Image: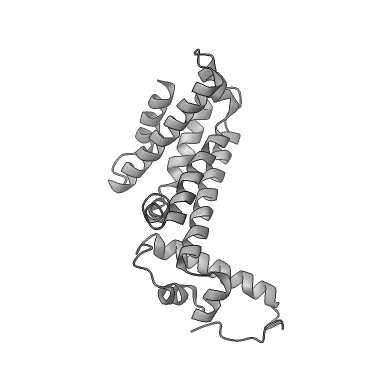
Amino acid sequence: MADTSSTPGRPYAGESHTDRAARRSEQLLDAGFELFGTVGYRATTVRALCREAKVTDRYFYKSFANSEDLIAAVYRRCIDRLQDAVLDGLRAAPSTDPDALITAGLDAFFAAVEDPRLARIVWLEVLGASPRLDELYIATLSTFLDIIPATVLDAFEQQGLDREHTQLVAIALVGAINTTGMAWFLRGYDTPRSAIVAAAKRVITG
């Protein structure tokens, strides 16, 4: 196996101990994304992760307590990637046009989940894997409410909904979009993204 060198705390090949530890963690996160997103969490061993990451087993346990810790970190990274993609899409759209914001946000979301590794981790590999991961999954869903633009929420309120009911509708819409994306992934992306965006948009604007 690669990366077996070094005395703790000493630079090696111009790389500090801290930098080496950070690099190994990144390699393991990348390996987790690849293997959890293809083979699956339950079928992936620590040895396989280390082989993919090109580190020895002992370095795995310097970064993560177990594979559950690693998939939790990989899952959070996937969610960050999704949210960043949506936020970037929203920033590129006119901030005062709810229709344009909805289209931009949806297109960015569905573009991100076109990576089947990310989609598998987000929708199939975490929920049901353990009580701790179930809690993480449920807590994470609510964070998507925080990135819904105020302009869109205001548009709901203008239709006669108070703030409480607007929040409930937003939760329902996040769930609907999530389910639509998962179904699209499970069907092998058999529908053009533009059609998925249009369908999800109809749900929101309806």
Against 198, residue 108 (above or below) is: below
Q: Is residue 109 left or right of residue 180?
A: right
Give coordinates of residue 35: x percent, y percent. 40, 65
In depth, the one of 190 and 38 nearer the eye is 38
Q: Which image quarter is the C terminus in? A: top left
* Quarter holding residue 40: bottom left
116 vs 203: above or below: below
Q: Nearer the viewer, residue 67 or 17?
A: 67
Q: Residue at x 56, y 82 (%)?
A: 3
On the image, the x and y values in percent for residue 38 come to 36, 61
Taking depth in this image into account, of 164 and 9 the one nearest to the observer is: 164
Count of marks placed on residues:
0
Above or below, 88 relative to 11: above
Q: Position of residue 34 (x, y in %)?
A: 43, 63
Q: Position of residue 96 (x, y in %)?
A: 60, 22
Compared with residue 189, is residue 7 higher up or lower down, i.e. above or below?
below
Q: Is residue 206 visible?
A: yes
